[in-house]
Amino acid sequence: MKAVVQRVMDASVSVHGVVKGSVSHGLLVYLGVAHDDTESDADWLSEKIAYLRIFDDDDGRMNLSLKDLSSIDKEKASLLAVSQFTLLADARKGRRPSWNGAAPPEKAKQLYEYFINAVQKTGLVCESGEFQAHMMVKYTNDGPVTIILDTKEI
């Protein structure tokens, strides 16, 4: 399972002009599910993201996690999860990426929804996009802070 985690001031995802999910402050997470991913990958990733210390403390140091922020103000610390199978692209050969590493849609949807539930079990607010839809994502990256996580590299 791969995730691109971005610290954002705001983020929203819409389908056909209808907003499906939005956050006013927190994290935007693009999530790609590989064919060999399991619920344990989603559990590890949700826990890692919830407690990743990438928010500034009072001294301006990245020392706070999204969980830390949510204990201060739940409304200003949430996560927007967007499914993105293109994270599993293999572009090493030729000019057209291969998607062979991506999970089939049924499995990917199940693990994407499992990930969202796992994030919510940590006590965080987790908004989401619409699986397999053409989505428009708008956000303001804060920092910019962007971190790539891959459960196959742990």
Image (cartoon, rainbow, N blue to C red):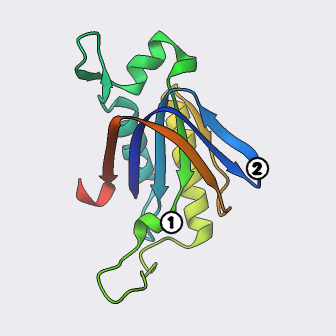
**Which residue is the site of mark 1?**
85
Q: Nearer the viewer, residue 146 or 132?
A: 146
Amino acid type at image mark 1 = Phe
Q: Secondary structure at mark 2?
A: loop
**Which residue is the site of mark 2?**
17
Q: Quadrant of the N terminus?
A: bottom left
| Mark linked to residue 75 | none
Q: Secondary structure at mark 1?
A: helix
In the image, 46: left or right of 118? left
Distance between mark 2 and mark 1 Cα atoms: 22 Å
Label whose residue precedes the other's in the sequence (2 or 1): 2
The image shows a total of numbered marks equal to 2
Amino acid type at image mark 2 = Gly
Whether residue 115 is situated above or below residue 69 in the rendered picture: below
Q: Categorize mark 1 by other alpha carbons within 10 Å: few (<14), some (14-19), many (20+).
A: many
Whether residue 117 is situated above or below residue 131 in the rendered picture: above
Whether residue 64 is situated above or below residue 154 in the rendered picture: above
Whether residue 58 is situated above or below residue 103 in the rendered picture: above
Select label 2 or label 1 by which is in front. 2
Q: Nearer the viewer, residue 46 or 131?
A: 131
Question: Residue 132, position in %: x, y?
Answer: 65, 64
Q: Residue at x 22, y 20 (%)?
A: 61
Q: Residue at x 47, y 45 (%)?
A: 29
Question: Residue 105, position in %: x, y?
Answer: 60, 69
Q: Quadrant of residue 63?
A: top left
Q: Residue at x 47, y 72 (%)?
A: 102
Q: Categorize mark 2 by other alpha carbons within 10 Å: few (<14), some (14-19), many (20+).
A: few
